[in-house]
Amino acid sequence: MKDLESQIANVGKFQDSFVTAKGETRASVSLTHPETLWFNTGTLCNIECVNCYIESSPTNDALVYITAGEVRSYLDQIEERNWPIREIAFTGGEPFMNPQMIDMTRAALDRGFEVLILTNAMRPMMRKSMREGLLSLQEEYADKLTLRISVDHYRPDLHDEERGKGSFAKTLEGMQWLRDNGFKMAIAGRTLWDHDEVQSRAGYAAFFAEHGFDIDARNPGQTVLFPEMDETVEVPEITTACWGILGKSPDAVMCSSSRMVVKRKGAEKPAVLACTLLPYSPEFEMGHSLQEAEADVQLNHPHCAKFCVLGGASCSA
């Protein structure tokens, strides 16, 4: 349904990887400074959000659990390819649904990388085995580990509107546990409600202060406000001329600095994608190795325009 709505909204657009509907040369992005390698831990999640871009749910296993051994293989490839990776990041689904989450995190931390985990901080993270594992990692690598918590809105009713009744309270419980045990936290919020950025950041600041969370609401790396990705809205295609018109550099777009590893259901081995936002678009699958993933990325999707180029957003810290 989402693909059909996108086609209707952007009829005639995003059809050719190299040429726009107007016959202009489509913009592309080179991997100029790889900083973050993402791993999707699987699309299974303990909840089902209204506007989840990856359609995670308790039943969606389109992307299956990746293993610690597979993660280590890609960490080896980083060294072999001499990529200047700073950060290993894990997303889902809900990463703490994956039974090897602690092992995967440790594998990355052991190699000296910073680690970012995106989580809803709900029941999967709060299981005894996960809490014990996190505490062990915190003791050894406190300065290298950050958990970015999904708090769609600082108001419980609006957060629950997206994530289900009672979700805010469960997330708050997880955040309080993380706070009490000294973990570094960041927040991922949404702009779904058309509040301006000043209003949103002020609301999050009050929320952090109320609960004693050491998170800077004004720092976009600590409080990330994601633009909505409504595929039913028409967006412009990005041409090579747009860089000069917009005053932007392709080096500022997320695919110049990151790639994501996923494992599809039924696949023998993981694949590397150009973008964290497009797990179901075959055009953005780049092969199985980091070497193959060094190819240029053609900006042939509405998300490329709205989220990355025009929205200026990034999933990385």
Image: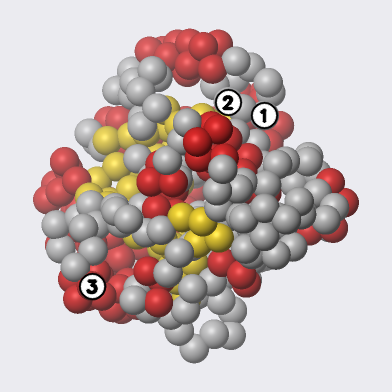
Which of the marked residues, 1 or 2, is nearer the chain's N terminus? Answer: 2
Label 1 belongs to which residue? 192
Mark 3 or 2, which is nearer the eye? 3
Judged left or right of residue 37, residue 17 is right
**Quadrant of the rendering where the C terminus is positioned:** top left
- Find residue 297 and report its horizontal and vertical position in percent: 50, 61
Q: Amino acid at mark 3?
A: Arg
Quadrant in the picture for residue 99: bottom left
Label 2 belongs to which residue? 153
Residue 151 in sight in this render: no
Is 157 located above or below residue 107 in the figure? above
- Find residue 225 and report its horizontal and vertical position in percent: 51, 30
Mark 1 or 2, which is nearer the eye? 1
Q: Is disc 1 surrounded by few (<14), some (14 to 19) or many (20+) residues within 10 Å?
A: some
Q: Amino acid at mark 1?
A: Leu
Residue at (60%, 15%) from the top-left corner? 196
Is 17 located above or below residue 158 in the figure? below
Residue at (58%, 85%) from the top-left corner? 266
Label 3 belongs to which residue? 81
Of all residues, the one furthest to the right in this rendering is 8
